[in-house]
Image (cartoon, grey):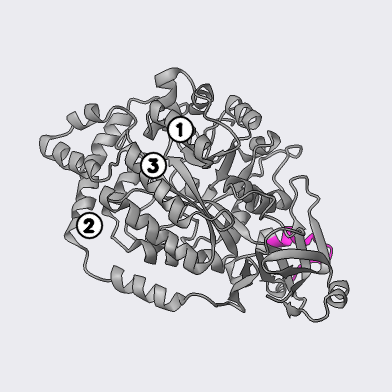
């Protein structure tokens, strides 16, 4: 592969948490065989590498590829499937009524959206379907990533308890009407796999797809409350022996914190620390209800976090205490969780939401900056996904040529003052529509707003055709079952005393 120069009006080499991001005006980077060779002013680099192909005309903003640090990748959103937003404890069971769609097609559909918004790496956590289809679904998903050329940190979510509410399954099921308890039990049984089966499937996926630079296979206990402690210890042991990273949900809702306090008079993070589970190979998703002690433990162990603001707002979970997390120097990324604010997995828009969400009242209070947000979406995401910030996350020499060219003229239209920090303008106003080109490993997979590897129109047409068919009997039955069990779930949690029943309550650190 010949050398390529990619130029921009502004070139973001690296976004720093301290607000000192390295931006080169009228700059460029040089890549060869997918690796960045050089950075600097375009004029100098074009003279130094005179025979190189030039991409960009100098009117773009060149940034590192964005990293989606937590995503379930259904592609077709829950809302599109008829599953309205709501509190997680009830919402999650409404998923029984989602229409079925081939995993390869779902993955390709979400990848179209991810690439269009400048995402080059995804933390993809695949949730359980039928137990018998687990391996097939996972391999189809990974086939889609391999075909599209997007980096992926892939994990299968494992769950062996609390399928309905946060307690022993049998107790809750026995409280249901006889006909309902039988149907519910059958529904749960169809999605269960043993831990040995889970590890067998994961190891096989790692053998067939694992590629340290393009595809990472991780382990994923779905959450503390969804996996028993002996299995959590086994997962940590297997991860250490085989070099797997671990990604799991953590304190997404207030009820999950209450559950752990009832069991051990500890938060889940405190309990996992006692189990020696935390560490730099572990990352959490959400973390809305983390407390100060949790943050201290995560900081000490370098346990990471993905912030998913749209998802947390849509599912009434709250707002994660990101300002405190940043002060604790905890590795942190940004994820869309397949529930972005507009159902389009626009990482640029998610960044803008982060920028606006964490600005507390008070003239002397600190607030999040555009540089910090960009760091989270690049360098932070590189750490969370376990690819490492020595491989991706910035446009420094020696790193992979994963990058995005955005239309600067469109971002600044109709007007932006010439003295405004361009990074501030980018995070505030950049959106999916501004993405012109996306490169991964030195290869353009999206150029001049057109895909080079996949056919998005065909994918969207197939999705539309399948979902336009009459709703199946199984889907209708799933929706009916979820509706019937919902009052029992509401009744179960009615006795759980929340810290505030009347006022807005967004996280543990208010």
Disc 2 to disc 3, C-alpha distance: 30 Å
Residue 238 on the magenta span:
no
Q: Quadrant of residue 46?
A: bottom right
Q: Mark 3 packing: few (<14 Cα in 10 Å), some, or many (20+)?
A: some
- Comparing 24 with 509, the one in front is 24
List the single residue furthest toward the top.
265
Earlier residue among tags 2 and 3: 3
Magenta range is: 415-426
Q: Secondary structure at mark 2?
A: helix
226 left or right, relative to 12: left
- Please name the residue that numbered disc 3 is placed on: 199
Q: Mark 1 packing: few (<14 Cα in 10 Å), some, or many (20+)?
A: many
- Please name the residue that numbered disc 1 is placed on: 254
Marks 1/3 in contact by CB < 8 Å: the verdict is no
Regarding residue 379, the answer to whether it shows in the image is yes
**Mark number displayed over residue 173:** none
**Mark number displayed over residue 475:** 2
422 left or right, relative to 187: right
Looking at the rendered image, the disc whose residue lies closer to the viewer, 1 or 3, is 3
Residue 416 on the magenta span:
yes
Residue 229 percent location from the top left of the image? 41, 26
Looking at the rendered image, the disc whose residue lies closer to the viewer, 2 or 3, is 3
Residue visible at 63% across and 46% down in the picture: 383
Compared with residue 84, is residue 149 higher up or lower down, i.e. above or below?
Answer: below
181 left or right, relative to 406: left
Looking at the rendered image, the disc whose residue lies closer to the viewer, 1 or 2, is 2
List the single residue furthest toward the left.
179
Q: Secondary structure at mark 3?
A: helix
Total marks shown come to: 3
Earlier residue among tags 1 and 3: 3
């Amino acid at each position: 592969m010949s050398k390529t120069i990619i130029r921009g009006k502004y070139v973001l080499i690296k976004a720093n948490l301290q607000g000192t991001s390295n931006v080169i005006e009228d700059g460029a980077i040089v890549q060869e065989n997918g690796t960045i060779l050089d950075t600097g002013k375009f004029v100098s680099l074009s003279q130094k590498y005179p025979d190189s192909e030039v991409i960009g005309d100098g009117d773009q903003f060149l940034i590192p590829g964005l990293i989606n640090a937590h995503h379930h990748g259904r592609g077709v959103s829950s809302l599109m499937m008829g599953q309205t937003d709501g509190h997680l404890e009830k919402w999650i069971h409404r998923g029984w009524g989602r229409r079925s769609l081939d995993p390869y097609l779902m993955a390709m559909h979400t990848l179209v959206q991810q690439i269009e918004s400048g995402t080059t790496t995804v933390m993809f956590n695949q949730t359980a379907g039928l137990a018998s289809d687990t391996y097939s679904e996972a391999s189809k998903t990974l086939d889609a990533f391999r075909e599209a050329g997007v980096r992926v940190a892939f994990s299968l979510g494992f769950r062996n308890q609390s399928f309905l509410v946060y307690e022993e399954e049998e107790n809750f099921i026995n409280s249901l009407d006889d006909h309902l308890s039988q149907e519910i039990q059958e529904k749960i049984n169809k999605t269960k796999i043993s831990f040995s089966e889970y590890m067998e499937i994961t190891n096989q996926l790692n053998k067939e797809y694992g590629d340290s630079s393009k595809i990472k296979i991780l382990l994923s206990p779905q959450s503390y409350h969804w996996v028993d402690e002996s299995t959590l210890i086994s997962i940590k042991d297997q991860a250490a022996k085989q070099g797997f990273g671990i990604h799991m949900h953590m304190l997404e809702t207030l009820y999950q914190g209450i559950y752990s306090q009832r069991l051990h008079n500890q938060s889940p993070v405190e309990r996992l620390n006692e189990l020696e589970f935390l560490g730099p190979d572990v990352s959490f998703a959400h973390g809305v209800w983390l407390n100060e002690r949790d943050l201290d433990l995560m900081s000490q162990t370098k346990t990471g976090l993905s912030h998913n603001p749209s998802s947390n707002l849509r599912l009434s979970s709250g707002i994660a205490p990101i300002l405190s997390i940043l002060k604790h120097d905890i590795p942190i990324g940004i994820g869309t969780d397949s529930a972005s604010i507009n159902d389009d997995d626009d990482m640029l828009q998610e960044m803008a939401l982060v920028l606006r969400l964490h600005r507390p009242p008070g003239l002397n209070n600190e607030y999040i900056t555009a540089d910090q947000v960009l760091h989270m979406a690049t360098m932070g995401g590189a750490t969370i996904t376990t690819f490492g910030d020595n491989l991706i996350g910035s446009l420094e020499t020696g790193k992979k040529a994963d990058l995005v060219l955005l239309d600067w003229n469109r971002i600044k239209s109709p007007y932006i003052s010439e003295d405004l920090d361009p990074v501030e303008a980018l995070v505030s106003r950049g959106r999916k529509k501004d993405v012109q080109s996306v490169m991964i490993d030195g290869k353009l997979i999206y150029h001049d707003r057109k895909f080079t590897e996949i056919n998005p129109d065909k994918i969207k047409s197939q999705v539309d055709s399948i979902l336009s068919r009459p709703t199946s009997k199984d889907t209708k039955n799933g929706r009916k079952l979820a509706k019937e069990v919902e009052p029992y779930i509401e009744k179960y949690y009615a006795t759980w005393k929340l810290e505030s029943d009347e006022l807005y309550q967004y996280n543990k650190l208010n």
